[in-house]
């Protein structure tokens, strides 16, 4: 999370309670002024504390109009109720909450079938706080397996590496930094905005712990060609004996492709795919934070990484970075699997894809923008201004849309395509066709004003780098 420093304001900044809106006694409430950055010496009534915090949060954006995030912003009341009922349950207390643990096991089983594990009984997996933790666990398993295969290289201090596109989400750069693995990032080139098989294999050697293939890319929603990468790695092995496993980062796509692209082979059907992660809180349709990581079989997860906790008088294997974690999201994930089934999930994801492709088309028709992607893989697309547009840029568009409440991020691309800046729209469950039409109308209305600008106002410095 963001790193903060303590505040040293003198005099200390204080809340002021509105007498009428802050509990039973307006006269007493008017005297309350608890400090904001230190503990007050005396308590304030619960209603007053609620009102003060509630009012301050009015300044947060409207989550339903947030087209920047991949993370769920709407769930049905029944799911929300279940989550509230489970708010106090700690996921690690397997012995105390055995049924929550049972639901987690069922979710792993459902995903293992959905992702075509060759022998679901031998596949293994767990819930996590999100795809970042899931990716770290996947990466740790890859690193340990490499060390076991290459004990001399490991002991002699050779640095292992992980091959991936420069478009990977920041969690993979974190993994490499924290676990001292060289990040071999394949830069973008021309109109290639993600990893391809040839460039991936060209960077692999005997110290490569794995290749991360992303389904689909955070930058533009495109799927990386997992099967082509796997086949190129098969040929590498035939040529050189170097055996490089694949981890699929399916943060979003692992909950889209099984329902909408059943013929796309990207998962455990490819023998080279050792592990897959997804975010339950993205297209798994659960509020933050829950993720999942699965290994195709126990052999892909070194035993020494596994810790055991008590469960119904016995031991249960666990693998995680945190110890305590909320159980409510796991319960909600199981609710969604139960509630929607395969057809229900397909209907929800298809609706998102239809909204995304129609909206992308509508934006293209406005004439001022060109599409990098069309929302036909992840329901996500990126677009930029056409070369003829000189009066404004994507950052101006993002800023002006914000005035209407729409949050559409603008950002620059990474290495070798830093010249390219785009806007990105993530269509999630709850972003309806009606809302998409309103966005398109607003964008159309803005264009004459933007075109009358003397020139682009440019990127606000903090938003030109992108960390979603
Ligand atoms: C491809 C990809 N991987 C990993 C992550 C990190 O996921 P989480 O936010 O669940 O930790 C994201 C987030 O957007 C992503 O798009």
Image: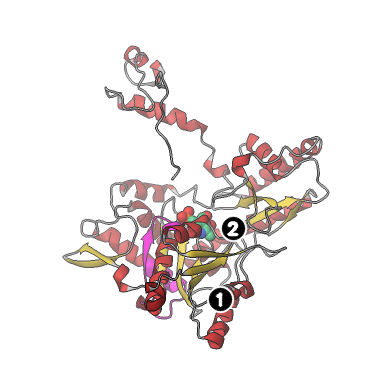
Above/below status of 46 relative to 278: above
Residue 147 in magenta stretch: no
Residue 193 occupies quadrant: bottom right
Q: Secondary structure at mark 1?
A: loop
In the rendered image, residue 211, in percent from the top left (x then y), is placed at 52, 71
In the rendered image, residue 139, in percent from the top left (x then y), is placed at 43, 66
Image quarter in which the N terminus is found = top left
How much space separates mark 1 and mark 2, taking CA atoms? 22 Å
Give the number of the disc on residue 265: 1
Q: Earlier in the sequence, mark 1 or mark 2?
A: 1
Q: How many marks?
A: 2
Q: Residue at x 80, y 50 (%)?
A: 367
Asked if the residue under mark 2 is in contact with the one under mark 1, i.e. CB atoms within 8 Å, the reply is: no
Q: Residue at x 59, y 53 (%)?
A: 427
Give the number of the disc on residue 119: none
Marks 1, 2: nearer the viewer: 1
Is residue 279 at all visible to an observer of this figure?
Answer: no
Disc 1 crowd, CA 10 A, few/some/many (<14, 14-19, 20+): some
Above/below status of 224 relative to 436: below
Give the number of the disc on residue 351: 2
Q: Which residues are magenta?
A: 108-134
User: Is the C-beta of the residue carrying label 1 under 8 Å from the nearest atom of ligand 1?
Assistant: no
Is residue 30 at all visible to an observer of this figure?
Answer: yes
Q: Residue furthest right?
A: 388
In the rendered image, residue 74, in percent from the top left (x then y), is placed at 49, 48
Q: Residue furthest bottom?
A: 238
């Amino acid at each position: 999370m963001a790193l903060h420093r303590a505040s040293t304001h003198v005099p200390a900044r204080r809340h002021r309670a509105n007498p009428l809106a802050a509990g039973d006694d307006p006269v007493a409430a008017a005297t309350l002024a608890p400090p904001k950055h230190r503990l007050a010496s005396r308590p304030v009534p619960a209603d007053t504390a609620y009102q003060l915090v509630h009012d301050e949060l009015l300044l947060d954006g409207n989550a339903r109009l947030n087209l920047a995030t991949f993370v769920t912003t709407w769930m049905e009341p029944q799911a929300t109720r279940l989550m509230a009922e489970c708010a106090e349950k700690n996921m690690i207390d397997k012995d105390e909450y055995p049924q929550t643990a049972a639901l987690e096991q069922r979710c792993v089983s459902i995903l293992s079938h959905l992702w075509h594990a060759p022998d679901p009984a031998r596949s293994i997996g767990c819930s996590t706080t999100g795809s970042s933790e899931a990716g770290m666990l996947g990466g740790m398993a890859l690193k340990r397996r490499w060390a076991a295969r290459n004990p001399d290289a490991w002991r002699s201090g050779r640095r292992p590496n992980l091959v991936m596109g420069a478009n990977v989400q920041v969690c993979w750069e974190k993994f490499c930094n924290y676990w001292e693995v060289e990040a071999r990032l394949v830069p973008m080139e021309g109109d290639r905005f993600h990893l391809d098989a040839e460039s991936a294999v060209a960077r692999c050697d005997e110290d490569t712990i794995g290749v991360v293939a992303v389904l689909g890319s955070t930058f533009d929603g495109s799927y990386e060609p997992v099967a082509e990468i796997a086949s190129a790695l098969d040929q590498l092995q035939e040529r050189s004996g170097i055996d490089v496993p694949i981890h699929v980062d399916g943060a979003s796509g692992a909950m889209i492709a099984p329902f909408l692209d059943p013929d796309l082979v990207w998962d455990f059907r490819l023998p080279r795919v050792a592990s897959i992660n997804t975010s339950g809180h993205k297209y798994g349709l659960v509020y933050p934070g829950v993720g999942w990581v699965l290994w195709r079989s126990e052999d892909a997860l070194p035993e020494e990484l596994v810790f055991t906790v008590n469960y119904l008088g016995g031991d249960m294997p666990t693998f995680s970075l945190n110890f305590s974690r909320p159980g409510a999201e796991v319960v909600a994930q199981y609710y969604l699997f139960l509630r929607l089934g395969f057809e229900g999930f397909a209907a929800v994801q298809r609706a998102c894809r239809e909204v995304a492709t129609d909206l992308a088309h509508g934006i293209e028709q406005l004439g001022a923008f060109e599409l990098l992607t069309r929302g036909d893989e992840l329901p996500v697309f990126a677009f930029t201004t056409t070369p003829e547009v000189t009066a404004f840029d994507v950052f101006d568009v993002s800023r002006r849309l914000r005035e209407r409440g729409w949050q559409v991020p603008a950002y620059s691309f990474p290495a070798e395509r830093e010249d390219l800046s785009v806007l990105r729209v993530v269509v999630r469950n709850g972003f309806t066709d009606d809302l998409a039409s309103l966005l398109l109308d607003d964008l159309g209305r803005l264009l004459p004003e933007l075109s009358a600008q003397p020139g682009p106002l440019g990127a606000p410095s903090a938003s030109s780098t992108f960390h979603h």
